[in-house]
Amino acid sequence: MIKKYQLFLEQITLSKTLSHDEAFLDFLNTIFECQKYYSDQNFDGMNPFSHSYTMCAKSHNDHNMDPERDLQLIKNYMRKYGWSEENVAELSKMPNFFNRIYRENTTASAPMDYYLYSITNNQFPLQGYKWEIDQNGEERYGDENELIIRFSYGWHRSKYGKLVIKQNIGSVSKFLMLCLKDISNVIIERLNGIFYLYQGFIGNENQNDLMLELKSCFFPDKDYKEIYIDSFELLKICKRISDINQSQLEFDNLIIGICNKLHLETRIISEGDIKITFMDA
């Protein structure tokens, strides 16, 4: 085993033997140089090495995004400077390899995240961190659900987006289900931002009661592929607690506008009756 590791060290240096720490530092330096090299290159469209994972995961940026192509570019560069896949595999056997990689904050772009993910047995967190999601699938920042934001940017449609979704949630279909499950909360929060529905309700308990009453107007099917909104009853509740002069059709179109911004397929079946369909691309 010692002879094998010694041979490995000799392969990546022409004139001297490296210690574990020296080999690791040489590997890190090569990663940084690789990132710098490709970030200066011209790509057909947006350069994935010059943007964050969040930017690369948006579906409208996905026209030239290919994680496997980018991974191969990195492997080619690393191999050229002594870090073949075999050498990297040997280095990864050193104690606490993953923890050291993670602590060094090596993430700089979506392609490099994917490379580190591939050499750490899928442990390295794509996007640089793991999503903190509770048993209900909620990951909240303020009043907005972060999963819904990712959905609205089309992460479930892009190659880089699908990779990080699968790492954190397990499957794209589960991600879609969790997103649609929380659509009612998002719509109600948007309505509250327009009509100040919570203004006369003091205390979390009273606000929670109002939220439950508003959510009773949303009717998802069992698989959360579709949601029906009783917009007639929803407007009735809103008018009871806030000064709203909108007609039913105006209110329906307001909800359609909210859903359109979330990239949801929504239509008015009849006045006061709205249907949201979850399209899995």
Image (cartoon, grey):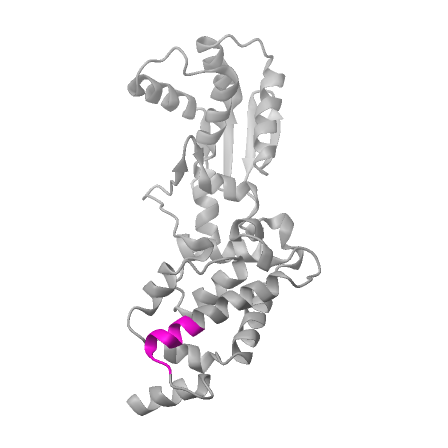
- Residue 251, position as x, y percentages in the image: 58, 18
Judging depth in this view, the residue of 152 and 54 nearest the camera is 54
Magenta stretch: give its range: 18-26
Q: Position of residue 245 (x, y in %)?
A: 57, 8
Q: Main secondary structure of the magenta part?
A: helix
Tell me how many marks there are: 0
The stretch drawn in magenta includes residue 208: no
Q: Is residue 38 visible?
A: yes
Q: Is residue 1 visible?
A: no
Q: Residue furthest front?
A: 15
Q: Residue at x 66, y 59 (%)?
A: 64
* In this rendering, position of residue 147 left or right of residue 123: right
Q: Residue at x 64, y 62 (%)?
A: 40
Whole-percent x and y of residue 192?
Answer: 47, 20
Nearer to me, 54 or 39: 39
| Residue 219 screen position, x and y as percent | 45, 31
Taking the spot 53% from the left edge, 10% from the top edge, the residue there is 244
